[in-house]
């Protein structure tokens, strides 16, 4: 368990930012409370406590820091180094309007278990993958150079994927194992989102590349046909024109379009080339969208059958029976398959 050292220090509030241990930052000293805190740090050996402001309220945990240098170049600024986490206790304002608080400094451990180091190795691998996907893999070794598991988790303070509240939660997590688990959870979510977006981009690019390749191949095929002296209109072009002129149902239209595309990709020497052409010719010859009036004259039908065909008595009888059923259904205004009678019985037309 981490040791705790209690001190009383002046407060430098941080609005819109957060500082972790081992961070070195430059802070512009502009507000009156910041100027007073800087002046008060002269009495504490340059030490003060940095407390982030979350939604206008002081966080419960801050960072004890040391003033490294103060410069006045068109405005006062200070180079500040984070030292340790601190649990913020009671505070009071002195006669100079400086807020002083009780700060319980949390001293980080120097030894870690194998389980902790395994967690740190897993986090390092995830961070390296994120940096690689963002195209900055070359600086990963420099960014992730620390061997300290707790310091590795604290590197998330630089992540653009976390908001201020999440970084404050990380600062408030004193236990290194819990901090690593929290960092792993967040970074795995980030990595998962990045991987998904990259897969979507790759699939979209692949579809675009395929479309472009097919277009270029068609252009090349057209140029080859022209060079070989093919007629003004290719075979495929003729079929496409017939397709545009035909009034096909949606299902037939989709199938015909697909077969024309297949025909365009096939060599004329391929057996399928002739099969598809035969199928297309037959399809286009069908009377799509045309209707005729049924001739249900049974005597006329019997005469035509006897005149055109010798024998086949059973077949002719079946055909006449079929026409008779059609005629009866038409005369009675029955549905295609059945009619419910007045007594509730169902007359099946076989």
Image (cartoon, rainbow, N blue to C red):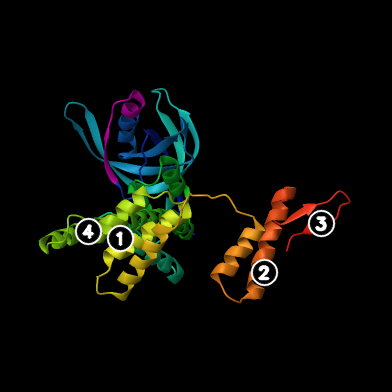
Which callout, 4 or 2, points to the residue nearer the camera? 2
> How far, Cα to Cα, is label 1 from label 2?
93 Å
> How far, Cα to Cα, is label 1 from label 4?
69 Å
Which callout, 2 or 3, points to the residue nearer the camera? 2
Marks 4 & 2, CB-CB < 8 Å contact: no
Q: Circle 2 is placed at which residue position?
A: 318
Which callout, 1 or 2, points to the residue nearer the camera? 2
Residue 306: image x %, image y %? 60, 69
Q: Circle 3 is placed at which residue position?
A: 346
Q: Circle 1 is placed at which residue position?
A: 146
Dot 3, how many residues are within 10 Å of its Cα: few (below 14), some (14-19), or many (20+)?
A: few
Q: Circle 4 is placed at which residue position?
A: 234
> How far, Cα to Cα, is label 4 from label 3?
58 Å
Which callout, 1 or 3, points to the residue nearer the camera? 3
Tell me which numbered mark, 1 or 4, is placed earlier along the sequence.
1
Quadrant of res 64: top left
> How far, Cα to Cα, is label 2 from label 3?
23 Å
Q: Is residue 101 above or below residue 289?
A: above
Of the pair 119 and 160, the residue shown nearer to us? 160
Q: Is residue 255 above or below residue 47?
A: below
Tell me which numbered mark, 4 or 3, is placed earlier along the sequence.
4
Residue 312: image x %, image y %? 61, 76
Dot 1, how many residues are within 10 Å of its Cα: few (below 14), some (14-19), or many (20+)?
A: few
| Region in magenta | 24-36
Marks 1 & 2, CB-CB < 8 Å contact: no
Tell me which numbered mark, 2 or 3, is placed earlier along the sequence.
2
Q: Is residue 1 above or below residue 14?
A: below
Q: Residue at x 28, y 29 (%)?
A: 29
Q: Residue at x 83, y 51 (%)?
A: 341
Tell me which numbered mark, 1 or 3, is placed earlier along the sequence.
1
Q: Secondary structure at mark 3?
A: strand
């Amino acid at each position: 368990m981490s040791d705790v050292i209690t001190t009383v220090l002046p407060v430098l509030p941080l609005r819109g930012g957060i500082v972790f241990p081992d961070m070195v930052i430059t802070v512009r000293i502009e507000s009156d409370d910041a100027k007073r805190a800087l002046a008060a740090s002269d009495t504490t050996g340059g030490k003060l406590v940095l407390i982030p402001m979350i939604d206008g309220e002081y966080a419960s945990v801050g960072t004890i820091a040391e003033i490294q240098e103060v410069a006045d170049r068109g405005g006062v600024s200070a180079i500040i180094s984070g030292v340790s986490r601190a649990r913020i206790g009671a505070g009071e304002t002195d006669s100079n309007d400086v807020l002083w608080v009780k700060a319980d400094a949390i001293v980080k451990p120097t030894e870690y278990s194998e389980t902790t180091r395994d967690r740190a190795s897993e986090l390092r691998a995830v961070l390296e993958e994120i940096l690689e996907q963002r195209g900055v893999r070359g600086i990963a070794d420099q960014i992730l150079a620390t061997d300290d598991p707790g310091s590795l988790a604290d590197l998330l303070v630089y992540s653009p994927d976390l908001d201020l509240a999440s970084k404050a939660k990380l600062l408030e997590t004193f236990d290194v194992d819990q901090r690593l688990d929290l960092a792993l959870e967040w970074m795995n979510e980030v990595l998962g989102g990045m991987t998904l977006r990259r897969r979507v981009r790759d699939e979209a690019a692949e579809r675009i590349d395929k479309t472009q390749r097919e277009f270029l191949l068609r252009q090349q095929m057209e140029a080859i046909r022209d060079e070989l002296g093919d007629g003004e209109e290719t075979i495929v072009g003729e079929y496409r024109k017939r397709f545009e002129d035909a009034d096909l149902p949606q299902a037939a239209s989709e199938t015909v379009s697909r077969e024309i595309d297949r025909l365009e990709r096939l060599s004329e020497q391929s057996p399928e080339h002739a099969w598809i052409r035969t199928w297309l010719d037959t399809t286009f010859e069908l009377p799509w969208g045309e209707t005729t009036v049924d001739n249900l004259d049974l005597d006329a039908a019997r005469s035509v059958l006897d005149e055109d065909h010798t024998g086949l008595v059973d077949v002719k009888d079946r055909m006449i029976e079929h026409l008779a059923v059609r005629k009866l259904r038409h005369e009675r205004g029955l549905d295609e398959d059945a009619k419910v009678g007045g007594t509730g019985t169902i007359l099946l037309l076989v």
